[in-house]
Image (cartoon, grey):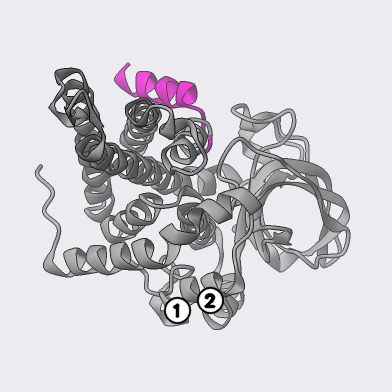
Amino acid sequence: MMIQLTKEQEIIRQEIRKFAEEKIAPLAGEIDKTGKYSSELLELFAEHDLFKLKLPEKYGGLEEEPTTYYLIIEEIARVCGSSAMFVAIQGSCMTSIRAGGDEQLKERVFGKLGKENLLMGWALTEPNAGSDVASMETRAVLDGDHYVINGSKCFISGGTGGQPADIYTAFVKTGNAKGKKNISGFVVEKDTPGFRIGKIESKLGMHGSQAVELIFKDARVPKENLMGKEGDGWRILMESIKETRLGIGAMALGLAQGALDQAINHAKQRVQFGRPISEFQGIQFMLADMKMQVEASRAMVYQTASMLERGVKNILPYASMAKCFASDAAMKVTTDAVQILGGSGYMHDYPVERMMRDAKATQIMEGTNQIQRLIIAKSIF
């Protein structure tokens, strides 16, 4: 099916693009350098309700449809991958709570998110459980009115520049069942007794979005913070991940489009041998290939978003295809953009090297692209 944006979606795209180019783009290099956001920029994010895109309307959110949500992520990533990460992580956490939380939990957590601009984090990965989620070791045991959690998580996105996320959706083991059947999801607030932030990672890219270690040492989480029932975690993950992976695909698409824009502008302006390098066939062919990769990625991301809106079942393989293809394309397009800019492309003064570093993360997060290919292959057979 051909995807046609509505007039309202086109207006939203233009508004977000204007905001991103005028407010985020001038600061993107400094964010990458320092790993911090100014309070003024975070306030601007809040003014544009970028932390509430997936929050239900009844709690003061926008509850955007998938296509609108992903085009917003794309437009922000076009100038700054870290900023798009904020939007994607907020959406991932809200999606999990929406999929697993009872009305009481939603009322409490979503109500708080509607009144305050809180940052969220999505906690799944552990030192010995990355792609192999079922091997997680962090465990929660019911003790009266609380679950006591012990263990750790690593590479968890959320927060910025020493400011941790306020709320985490964390997936841990409960009960005695084996494998995926004993995974449960919890809402964990940053001031939970026994819970703390450990190591803050030094990363290749996405510097504005922190990746941290989470440490649970007899952390006491109210039993009301359990999402669904014990053992519902895998179901909640599967409900969430088809959307969260598509968010990474949209982020990768935006990074690729941003790098392509930079490469085209440079090719028009850079003069060698008496003429713009855009007139050389070698450059033209590179840009043509980059354009094809970007447009194919856009088609896959938006088509899958449309499937979500229409309630198509079993779309997880399509979300995997969109995430895998778009992130591989982003890595290729951003690398080629660096090549077209030549020596300038390798310097921090130009955004394409940052985009290349940020693009690498999209091939790894929310399931490596090798895992995506396994999911796709399984769906074939």
Figure disc tally: 2
Quarter of the C terminus within the rendering? top left
Location of residue 379 with respect to 53 vertically, above or below? above
Residue ID at (47%, 36%):
353
Magenta stretch: give its range. Answer: 365-381
Residue under numbered circle 2: 43
Say which element carries label 1.
Answer: helix
Residue 168's disc number: none
Left or right: 330 as drawn, with respect to 27: left
Query: Is residue 92 visible to the viewer in this orientation of the structure?
Result: no
Q: Using the image, tell me which numbered label, if any, was put on residue 47.
A: 1
Q: Tell me residue 250's x, y (percent).
A: 35, 46
Position of 126 compared to 95: left or right? right
Give 305 or 274, whichever is nearer the viewer. 274
| Observer-nearest of 128 and 337 | 337
Tell me which amino acid carries mark 2. Glu
Residue type indicated by callout 1: Glu
Q: Is residue 44 magenta?
A: no
Task: Quadrant for the N terminus, please.
Answer: top left
Contact flag, marks 2 and 1 (Cβ < 8 Å): yes
Name the residue at 20% across, 18% down: 282
Magenta-drawn stretch contains 371: yes
Left or right for 154, reference 336: right
Residue 259's place in the image compared with 69, above or below, is: above
Q: Residues within 10 Å of mark 1 (few under 14, many from 20)?
A: few
Magenta-colored segment: predominant secondary structure:
helix
Instruction: Say which of 124 and 285 sits in front.
Output: 285
